[in-house]
Amino acid sequence: MAFSRKWKLAACVPLAMAVLAGCGSDPKGAGDPGGAPGTGSGDKPPEPFTMTIYAAGVKPEEFDSRFRGALEKKFPHIKFDYQTSDKGNSITEKVARGEVPDIIRTDTPTMKSGYLDLQLGYDLRELVAKHKYDLNRFVSAFIQDNIDTGQTGALYGLPVPPYFPAVLYYNKDLFDKFGVPYPRDGMSWDEVYDLAVKMSRTDGGKVYRGFSSSLIALLRDNPYSLPILDPEKDGLADQTKWKAIFDNFKRFHQIPNNAVESTFALENAVFTKGQSAMYLGQHSIYFVVPPEVNWDIVSVPTLAGAPKLMGQRSPAYWSITQQSKHKDEAFQVIMEMLSDEVQMQDSRNGIPTTLVKKEIRDALGKAHPIYSTKNMKALTLYEPTTPTPKRGKDKASVPGSLQETIIWQSFVKTAQGQADVNSVLREADERLKQELEKDKNK
């Protein structure tokens, strides 16, 4: 069956990457780039030039704090022109003006529309081989996800932190208030359900929910790594598995005083307001819990019959544009931004690494004023799940954001008792088919 084939593919990734990477790597895992161009003995000083790096949605302050210092030290002859998606500067607008960057930050949801469809795609495999760059230093699922998304066998990017692991937050003060033991790492969803029953209550006129969630993380980053849109046929993917997912989470909202909110934003805010004992969400440096909420985290719960892996939103990728006149230098710049040293600093600041190196993983949050007090080992108890299967290259498709909206609206409808699970899944299947027809008729 398809699920078994996916596991076989994942098992082959390390071997495939080893062949692709060639032999040898330096202690940083970056191969031997030979230093900055033209710095060998007897060489002329390298000619100065400007390299443009574009990352939509990433503020200049973040780029500067994470990367600029290391890059300017390593490549003093390069001036780094960092650009982001402020008004009038989407990547589509920039390409239309002929302003193509050398390096671009891509991601899985927008790789097609924001990179490949703009004729920017450049296969990194030749440079990987040239620099003997060891791809096995990365989490294999992240490399495979990039290859699968491109659908040509090419490698269009290397994974840059952060990625966003699924995690279970809990409010320590509420558990203390009601005398219930805290959640722990390695729990099943059945065990979390039992806790939610105990913690869903009213007290002093206030309603406290036992469980809330980021509905997108709950559904999109599901325990089966199950896609929403079927990769091969038109409509919803494996409805039997979607029924298992809906049934598992629907029961939480049938507990008295634990009704799901009608919108994603309202549901997502319950925990940060101190009104929920537990919250299934994502670890992210961009997710801020107010200081008045005394929280900690444990590993994402496991579902019976599903792999014991961590659901996650995949990372972004550093990609090179085919129009760049400095591809080799751009690859060396990417190697530096993904070096052990840079990723160690990221990890210490609470940004989950894309590397498999244990000491970098174990350093997660150690230098952060808040994360250093939390159970950050919860994020590495399980390996990231395998990539969700992608829609066939020549098939009609539905934008990922719309797929997510359809599936969470369907879940809210059944969780609020408006329809049974089978009915809302049939409706989701029909909505996806309607959207596919629109795409076919463009």
Image: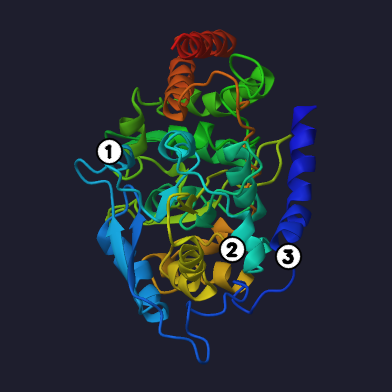
Residue 32's x, y, as percent?
61, 76
Dot placed on the residue nearer the N-terminal end, 1 or 2: 1
Q: How many angstroms separate mark 3 from mark 1 (CA)?
A: 38 Å
Q: Quadrant of the N terminus?
A: top right
Query: Mark 2 belongs to which amino acid?
Result: Leu
Q: Residue furthest left?
A: 87
Query: Mark 3 belongs to which amino acid?
Result: Gly
Quadrant in the rendering for residue 311: top right
Dot placed on the residue nearer the N-terminal end, 3 or 1: 3
The local crowd at label 3, few if under 14, some if 14 to 19, many if 20 or more residues have their Cα within 10 Å, is: some
Q: Quadrant of the C terminus?
A: top left
> Which residue corresponds to the image point at 37% horizontal and 53% vertical from the top-left?
173
> Which residue corresponds to the image point at 67% horizontal and 63% vertical from the top-left?
129
The local crowd at label 1, few if under 14, some if 14 to 19, many if 20 or more residues have their Cα within 10 Å, is: some
Tell me the residue that label 3 is attached to.
Answer: 22
Tell me the residue that label 1 is attached to.
Answer: 93
Query: Mark 1 belongs to which amino acid?
Result: Glu
> Which residue corresponds to the image point at 74% horizontal and 37% vertical from the top-left?
6
